[in-house]
Image: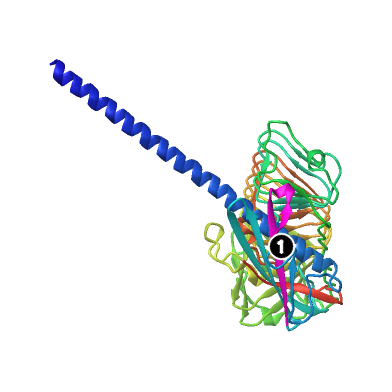
Amino acid sequence: MGKYALLLVSALIFSLLTYSYALKNALFQSNARTVQSFSQNQAYNIAQSAMMVAINDIRNNPDDSPFQPEVDNTYYYPSQNGFENWAEMNGSYNISSINQGDSLLVFQARGRFEESNYIVNVGLVKSSGGGFVWPPIDTAVHAEDDITLSGSGTIQGNASTNSSSNGAVTMNGGAGITGTLAIGPGGDPDKVLKKPKWHVGAGSGVYALENKYEYKLPDFPELPALPTGIPIKTEKWNDPTDFYADEFSNVYIPEISVNQNRSMNIHVGDQDRKIYVGNLNVQNGHINFIGTGKVELYVYNDMNFGSGSTLNCTGGFWNCTGDTSQLMTYYGGSNEFRLAGGQYFNGNLFIDSADAKFTGGSKFKGNLITGGDDLEVAGGFEGVSAFYAPNAYVQLKGGGNLTGFVVSDSYRSTGGTWVYEDNLDVELPDLDGGSGGTTFSVSYWN
């Protein structure tokens, strides 16, 4: 028995030693992967941020920026093979810009962190005059002034503010920023960011901008005076459900109204259409656009959505298959725009000056552009879009979440809310309202 017992003990010790070695090896490999992943993410952040510096410079100084070299020449910063140290990011970068035929600028930014490198390529098409040109956006949240995060409110991506004031960015509780934080020119990262000592703050570093980001609001289109037509209603069981857009083109419709869970189908065919309406009233109803033509919907006075209503949601709330890019709505009224109670807005929306509120399990898929002063998101709202509100105090609270990005005047997030940039894969709509002079539009960004 003693001999067999000794063999069993020896086998057990050997197994424990083997398991311990395997466990240590697995932990080492896991830690190595974690470090490698962080290094790659930081190199990515450096490259993206350096690209933003270059593009903002050429956008703000289109005729004097060194990033626009002579025709068919290349500009390198700091040199063709050299790298500029970026102390705040604990890494380095270089940038090149090629002027191809004075019509396309080809940028490349390389970020370096430890042994990791990341390359970003961007093409800018050069033009004179034309419509509104969207500025490049590389942050999940931007605020002209302050950013306040509390109660597990998070920004899952990069963030920026033009403010360099002490305490302009405040965090507490479980709040945080997973990416970089850019602050106003000349700002002190240790003073601008106010947080408890234990808090991680910005996950990939804090740095000061060389120049402020500039986010202008496009001009809201003028609402024309047109001949008055008849209201379009689907409210009772004997009311029609199908309408044809060519029957009321270039006519002002006093009201479009649908309720009682009925569906109004507006047939647009394969042509682009403009619809002008005084009041859009959808109370537990549905408006669908049938055909491939794009629709510009101009609402002069008021927009009301009741419980369970949908706009451009062929397939219904739970299976919304409408093409988001098909609908561009312009709202010129003064009453607050509101989505609540299981409503779904599927399209782009430009609000002239009214405030907006999204709550009650509503959904918004598209892009929101607003000149209003207040924008509130709460109560289980889900959005997949850009919220471009450079004049607004933007609040996310009570479980309101957004996949996309936010441009604001001031930003506050609390109560388990988040903004997730999702690689900023958001296509902003083409708008008129641009000014003359040289402009640059993004052709590709990868």
Q: Decide: is 5 above or below 149.
A: above
**x 62%, y 48%: residue:** 361
Please give the range of residues in magenta.
Answer: 83-100
How far from the left and from the top, in percent, is residue 271?
A: 65, 82
Task: Classify the position of the N terminus by image quarter.
Answer: top left
Query: Which residue is label 1 attached to?
Result: 51
The reply to whether the magenta stretch includes residue 284 is no
Q: Nearer the viewer, residue 329 or 152?
A: 152
Residue 120 appears left or right of 336: left
Where the C terminus falls, by quadrant? Answer: bottom right
Does residue 388 show up? yes
Q: Is residue 246 left or right of residue 409?
A: left
- Outermost residue toward the top in this view: 2
Q: How many marks?
A: 1
Helix, strand or loop: magenta stretch: strand
- Out of 241 and 249, give the one closest to the viewer: 249
Amino acid at circle 1: Met
